């Protein structure tokens, strides 16, 4: 499992996480994808995660949890510090969540960037 520690609390039942820093609006290569499965099909999982989060946000079906301060994302041997931007993650129950640092400039643009990036990533292999 993947754990996210932020706001003095830990979420430790994540199966997939997209880290979308603010620079991703101009440079999508900075988006980081973490999966607990590590399978080759993970890129399709991330594309579905990004697209579903984007559409649910547009339709007001999902809100954005505000984060304070830096976050730590741990997945096996991988440990990432995340200072500013947007997180999209899916819990083990299948629920999609969006969280953003309070001072993030434009969460909608970051959701769009994640959706575009993951869609292109999948299309490169088709």
Image (tube, rainbow, N blue to C red):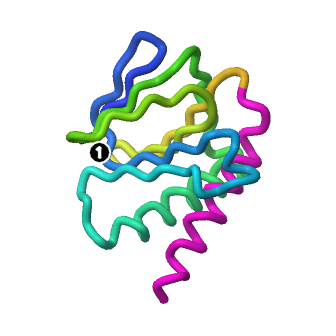
Image side of residue 19 versus residue 40, left or right? right
| Residue 60 occupies quadrant | top right
Q: Residue at x 61, y 23 (%)?
A: 66
Q: Residue at x 38, y 22 (%)?
A: 5
- Percent across and percent down for residue 10 are 34, 21
Q: Is residue 52 magenta?
A: no
Q: Nearer the viewer, residue 66 or 86?
A: 86
Image side of residue 121 versus residue 35, left or right? right
Mark 1 neighbour density, 10 Å: few (under 14) some (14–19) many (20 or more) = some
In the figure, 126 relative to 41: above or below? below
Across the whole image, how many numbered discs are drawn on residues? Answer: 1
In the figure, 62 relative to 122: above or below? above
Q: From which residue to which does the magenta span run?
A: 104-126
- Percent across and percent down for residue 110 are 69, 47
- Percent across and percent down for residue 102 are 68, 21
Residue, far bottom: 126
Residue tagged 1: 92
Image side of residue 126 versus residue 116, left or right? left
Q: Secondary structure at mark 1?
A: loop
Q: Is residue 123 magenta?
A: yes
**Main secondary structure of the magenta stretch:** helix
Q: Residue at x 78, y 38 (%)?
A: 106
In the figure, 78 relative to 8: above or below? below
| Residue 40 occupies quadrant | bottom left
């Amino acid at each position: 499992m993947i754990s996210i520690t932020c706001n003095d609390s830990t979420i430790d039942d994540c199966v997939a996480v997209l880290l979308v820093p603010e620079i991703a609006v101009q440079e999508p290569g900075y988006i980081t994808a973490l999966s607990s499965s590590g399978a080759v099909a993970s890129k399709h999982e991330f594309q579905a995660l990004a697209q579903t989060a984007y559409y649910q946000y547009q339709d007001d079906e999902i809100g954005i949890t505000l984060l304070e301060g830096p976050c730590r994302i741990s997945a096996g041997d991988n440990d990432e510090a995340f200072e500013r931007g947007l997180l999209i993650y899916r819990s083990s129950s299948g629920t999609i969540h969006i969280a953003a640092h309070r001072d993030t400039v434009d969460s909608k643009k970051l959701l769009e960037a994640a959706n575009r990036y993951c869609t292109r990533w999948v299309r490169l292999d088709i």
